[in-house]
Amino acid sequence: MATETLIWLVPLPPLLAFFLIVLFTNKSKALSHSIAVGAAFLSWLAAMLIFAAALGREHLGEDPFTSQINWLPTGDTFLKIGVMIDPLSAVVLFFVGWTVLMIFLYSVGYHNFGQPAGDHDHKGLPPHGATVTDEHGHKHTVLSIEPMYSRFFAFIGLFAFGMYTLVVSDNLLTLFVGWEIMGLCSYLLIGFWFAKPSARAAAIKAFMTTRVGDVFMLMGVAYLYSMTGTLSYRAIFYNEEVLHHLATTAAPLFGMSAAGLIGLLLFIGTVGKSAQWPLHIWLPDAMEGPTPVSAMIHAATMVSAGVYMVIRIFPLFTADWDHHSLTTTMSIIAFIGAFTAIFAATIAVAQNDIKKVLAYSTISQLGFMIAALGMGAYIAAAFHLVTHAFFKALLFLGSGSVIHGMEHGVMHTGDHHVDPQDMWNMGGLRKKMPITFWTFLIGGFALSGFPLVTAGFWSKDEILADAFAHGHWAILATLSIAALMTAFYTMRQITLTFFGEPRTKEAEHAHETPWTMTTPLVVLSVFAIGYGWLGIPEHFPGLGGIVPNWFHEFVGGTLIHHPEAVAFHWEPLAISLVVAFGGLGLGWVVYKDVKAGQPDPLEKPLGPLYPFLKNKWYFDEFYTYYVVGPMTWVSEVFTFQWMDRGVIDGIIHSVAQLAPAIGSFLRNWFDKPVVNELIGDGSAAVFQWLGHQLRFIQTGRLQAYLISAVATFLVVGAALYYFGF
């Protein structure tokens, strides 16, 4: 099979799985998950074959795998859609294939291993861990299987289809289609346990917040099409004439070029999708969904798609960049990324929910990537996107394994009021859950940038090195502090969860999860370590040149002009070492001796700042009072009561009151005298009079009729002759 044909087929298995499960296998849980996992495997296999073909193709950036078809007619031409695999989409397809497959496999164990108490109340089933008595009087402990099991696998299949579509697309239109499919799936899966009010609210919050960004993104797509007449990547981002035209054409607003304004509008879509400040508020609440959904959103699909789109349009918003001072658009992107990185990191240090720590970590790490793109570090951003996908998927799946281990403790104690996600209820789990512990430790060290042996070190260090090499001191300082805090809250999380003594009875009775959950952890931990070795800088002491910087050479070929690698400097390396070891060491020292019932050691030294951070800078409250509140007032008071009831209903009621008067007037002054009497009765009287006058010619005599006919013929003939006919 031709590689181009195979690319078209990559997204199809998850889509077919969605329809098969919804239409035919919804009642069979085993068959449903078999179809879903099988579909994920087929897409993974196709992705790996395509990746291998991409590796074997010389000059892939200049000559990518492409295929197009006509889609929508636009006058004399067609809007074309197609698929394309260039170096960037090849590496993204690689990590999407692996993470999606691992998440699908993990989901089988996750949903068959018991759910948190109360998740099934909407189906009337006993909660996980409850004790029930059968018809023979024997007592059993319930290990609930998710009642919407098949529905879950159908939805994540559609989710995977959206991401695969986005990655293999060769244009912004079908990218946007995949983008919106994922937006729908995030709504469906975040609110998967829809009986919980918090899950419903989180789903709506995610959907509405991301729609704000998507509106601006669609404006950017429309503006770009109006300027170029196409949305094809190759026709825009790899055409120097088109880029020059966009860079030299002034935008109607904001004093920037058309390229800059279009890039900014498209970037706002990423602000929503990748949860960057100020549209970050939806992502922590997305933890209301099942843990595999969290992994899908944070690693394999949703937020990765936002950063991927900015990397894809990099030639657009840098078209008017002189490679020295940043453009207005680049400055905005860099500021939002850097601020988001440190802003989210400050919140993460004060969170107690194991998944919410990771949620804010994701927001922060995405900020690193956005800041890198804002300062022009294309390769560094792409590298961190890939490594982050692996170790963040590992951490989220690891957190789900921890939660399930804690759930078994809840089953044994019967105390369903203990929160299995609160790290203060854990402790000592390294002995109870050794596989989860070691794999989580690898993921946590990768997130912290543990030197040399983790992928996160190499990708994060490259961002800091680029900031140092080009003199972006404010970005360097901000990201360095954010990296220090990342290492600190990561060790805080690891220490509170796995080290010390169990702080609750539930932690004492926790145990390891089944192989369907631990196998994906082991596989992802390999990538969390090994993938970073593909991007070791050429001049790195002791290692540079031994292992080629494959990632830089390969992905750099995506651009028209291959970016040069930054020169090696000791200063950013020293910063990386200090922040990694310093943060990890500080986290260990502060939290290694925490006992049951002890408050957070940070509370006292931070004082009033601690509740400020714990309450997420009160951004949710701010939006509630100053955004949601006024919008609700406008919709309920202004729009509904004043506009709808006062103005629109008033007009309708006035018309209703005038209608009888108008009807009476028309009846008395038009209907009766004109229609009835003049037209109706008058025409009848005229025809009656004519009938009375003409009745005399109806004699019944044939001779009279012939004489009348001859006379009429003569008169008509004379008239025609007279008038020249």
Image (cartoon, rainbow, N blue to C red):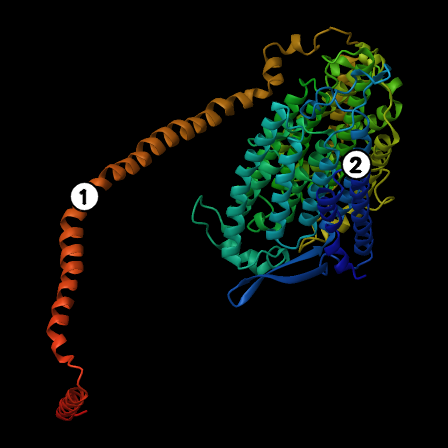
Which mark is first along the chain, 1 or 2? 2
Where residue 495 sits, quadrant-wise, is top right
Give the residue drawn at x 52%, y 42%. 215
Foreground of the two, 351 or 545:
351
Where residue 705 sits, quadrant-wise, is bottom left
Foreground of the two, 40 or 385:
40
Q: Which residue is mark 1?
A: 664
Q: The N terminus lies in which quarter of the figure? A: bottom right
Judged from the image, the secondary structure of the residue bearing numbered disc 2 is helix
Position of residue 653 in the picture relative to residue 80 (left or right)? left
Judged from the image, the secondary structure of the residue bearing numbered disc 1 is helix
Position of residue 660 in the picture relative to residue 524 (left or right)? left
Where residue 192 sits, quadrant-wise, is top right
Say what amino acid the circle numbered 1 marks: Ser
Give the residue drawn at x 58%, y 50%. 316
Residue found farthest to the front: 700
Q: Which residue is mark 2?
A: 29
Say what amino acid the circle numbered 2 marks: Lys
Query: Residue 299, image x and y in percent?
Result: 72, 36
Query: Residue 435, image x and y in percent?
Result: 88, 26
Position of residue 291 in the picture relative to residue 233 (left or right)? right
Query: Residue 199, image x and y in percent?
Result: 63, 26
Q: In the rendered image, is residue 342 in sight?
A: no
Foreground of the two, 66 or 582:
66
Query: Residue 485, image x and y in percent?
Result: 69, 23
Give the residue drawn at x 77%, y 9%. 594
Instruction: Tell me: residue 31, above or below residue 583.
Output: below
Give the residue drawn at x 62%, y 40%. 184
Position of residue 24 in the picture relative to residue 181 (left or right)? right
- Rounded to the nearest angstrom, the CA distance separating label 2 from label 1 is 69 Å
Kindly report which numbered mark, 2 or 1, lies closer to the viewer in this rendering. Answer: 1
